Amino acid sequence: MKMLTLRMKPKTIFGIILIITGVVVIMITFFSNHVDVKGTNVMSAVTLETNEEREDYLKSLGWEFNTNFTEKEIKIPAEFNDTYNKYNDIQKSQGFDLSKYKGETVKVYTYNITNYNGCENRDCIYANLLVYNNILIGGDVCSTSVSDGFMQALKKK
């Protein structure tokens, strides 16, 4: 039976350990710079710093809208009730999760949608974009009509 032995000087062993440690540190640094403090993958996050970026995002989903929009700040509750859990289910269905933002204040940008199927040019269909630190964290399309109100995910059906 043949046996393979490898003789290395202590400096060589130390050098190999140093190289492995360097690679691990580089990997940790790379991955930590690509995830924000809330755990959202920054590389796949939608950045919406300007109105133009928000409008482009809505257009990419197939929506047409009035260019006037409203902006307000809301605080996401620290504890979700049934209504907020149902709303978060809509968010989860489109890849968001508001539970990461419990207790945080976020901006809501609201646009009047003009091309919702069956409700074209009605003044009761709105798209809401929830933005935290210029990153889209959720949103919905809803009808404020008393007779046939609804709420759905952002993506056009």
Image (tube, helix red, strand yellow):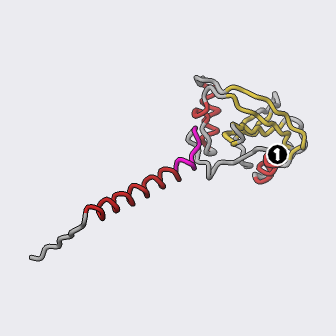
State left or right for residue 127 relative to residue 22. right
Measured as percent of width and height from the top left, residue 115 is found at 85, 47
Q: Nearer the viewer, residue 49 or 24?
A: 24
Q: In what element is the residue under mark 1? A: loop
Relative placement, left or right, of 91 versus 1 is: right
Q: Does residue 19 sit above or below 91 in this rendering?
A: below
Q: Quadrant of residue 153?
A: top right
Pick out the residue farthest to the left.
Answer: 1
Identify which amino acid the numbered label 1 is placed on. Tyr
Give the mark count.
1
Q: Nearer the viewer, residue 8 or 29?
A: 8
Q: Residue at x 12, y 76 (%)?
A: 2
Q: Main secondary structure of the magenta part?
A: loop
Q: 91 left or right of 147?
A: left
Q: Dividing the image into 4 quarters, which one contains the N terminus?
A: bottom left
- On the image, the x and y values in percent for residue 41 come to 58, 47
- Residue denoted by label 1: 116
Residue drawn where x is 31% and y is 59% of the image: 14
Whole-percent x, y for residue 116 in the image = 82, 45
Q: Position of residue 31 (x, y in %)?
A: 52, 51
Q: Which quadrant holds residue 152?
A: top right
Q: What span is colored magenta in the figure?
A: 31-37
Q: Is residue 71 above or below residue 24?
A: above
Residue situated furthest bottom in the rendering: 2
Of the pair 64 and 143, the residue shown nearer to us: 64
Q: Is residue 64 in the magenta section?
A: no
Q: Residue 149 lies in what quarter of the image? A: top right
